[in-house]
Amino acid sequence: MKSLILVLAVGGMAVVGWRSATLDERPGTPLGTSESATSGRALLPWTAASRASGPGDPGPGPQVDGMELVFVPAGDFLMGSPDDDPEAWPDQQPQRAVYLDAYWIDRTEVTNAMFEQFVEATGHNAGSYWRIIASGKPDHPVVYMNWFDADAYCEWAGRSLPTEAQWEKAARGTDGRKYPWGNEPPDEGRCNFYGNEGGTTAVGSYPAGASPYGALDMAGNVWELVADWYDSGYYAVSPRRNPPGPSAGEYRVLRGGSWFDVARLVRSSSRLNGPPVLRIDFFGFRCALP
C-alpha cells in the first residue's frame, strides 16, 4: 500500500486528495479472512432469487454469489445532462436518447463476503488490503480492488461489468431524473454521501434511495467501476443503440459517487475516471447480465 496525492478527474476537472491507495499490478499475498458482523442499520430484505422480468418469466435464476438481480426492460432513456444544467460538467453532454436492449443488473454493490467467496473459489490474487478493510464488514461493498479484479469477479459470476449506459439507465430510469429517487436533493435517508457515515455502509441500507427498477446504492457509498474506457467527448459521437464505450483509452469510468462526495457528485449523470490498476477505499462495483 502507498500513501499518495491522488488526482482523479471528474467532468474533465482534476480532483485532488490525500488517500491511501495501491497501484500495484502484481498485488501481494492475501491476509486473513473477514469476520461476521451486523451493521446496526435496518436493511431492505433481499434473497438470492432474482426478480422475474414479467409474468411467467422465472428470470436468470440464483446466482453463484447469491446476488439478487433487477430487470431493466428494453427501450430508450435519457442519458447525460441537458446543456442548460448549471451543475453538469461538459463530459455529461450532450444529453440524448439512448436505446438499450433488456438486461439484468445487480441490485446492490458486490459485498466483501461475496468477493471473498470469489477469491476462495478461484485463487484470484486481489492483494491483501481489501481483506483488512473487510474485517467485520461482510455486508459492506468490497473496496481496495481494481478494475481487473472487478472484471475477473463478474466473469466468475457469469455476468459482466455493466456498460456506462447500462449503469446509468438502471440508476435513473427513462425520464432524465437527477438522482435514482427523483430530482429532490440527497439526504441522510436516501444515500451515504458527504461523509455523513464516515465510511461505507452495508449494502441495501437506503431503500428510500432505490432506483425506478429497484437497484440500491446507486448514489453514494462507493464509486462503481463500469466496463467503459473514459472519453470526455464520447457522448457526442456514441451510437444511439447499445453504446459499447470507446474501443481504447487510458482510464476507466466510474459512476455514482461515494460516501464522502457532495451532492453534485452523486447525481446519476456524474462521471469519474481513474487508472484501471488503482485500488482505493471508495471504488467498488456491481455486475450486469445481458
Image (cartoon, grey):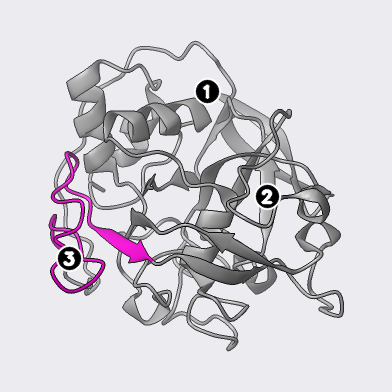
Q: Is label 1 in contact with label 2 (beta carbons under 8 Å)?
A: no
Would you place residue 82 above or below residue 166 in this image? below
Using residue 103 as the reference point, say whether residue 137 is left or right of it: left
Q: Could you tell me which residue is drawn at 17 percent across and 64 percent down?
A: 57
Q: Secondary structure at mark 1?
A: loop
The chief SS type of the magenta part is: loop
Furthest residue in direction bottom, as rendered? 184
Q: Which residues are magenta?
A: 46-72
Residue placed under numbered mark 1 in the picture:
1
Please report the residue visible at 73 percent of the width from the left and 28 percent of the height from the top. 250
Tell me, yes or no, whether the highlighted magenta stretch contains residue 171.
no
Does residue 51 belong to the magenta stretch?
A: yes
Q: Which residue is mark 2?
A: 272
Disc 2 secondary structure class: strand
Q: Position of residue 21 (x, y in %)?
A: 57, 31
| Residue type marked 1 | Met
Nearest to the observer: residue 204 or residue 199:
204
Q: Point out residue 195 in the picture as x, y percentages from the top left corner.
A: 54, 65
Q: Circle 3 — which element? A: loop
**Is residue 258 visible in this depiction of the protein?**
no
From this view, report whether residue 4 is shown above or below residue 223: above
Whether label 1 touches label 3, CB < 8 Å? no
Mark 3 highlights which residue?
Answer: 46
Place residue 82 in its image quadrant.
bottom right
In the image, 215 versus 261, the foreground residue is 215
Q: Amino acid under label 2?
A: Leu
Sequence order check: which comes first, mark 2 or mark 3?
3
Q: Earlier in the sequence, mark 1 or mark 2?
A: 1
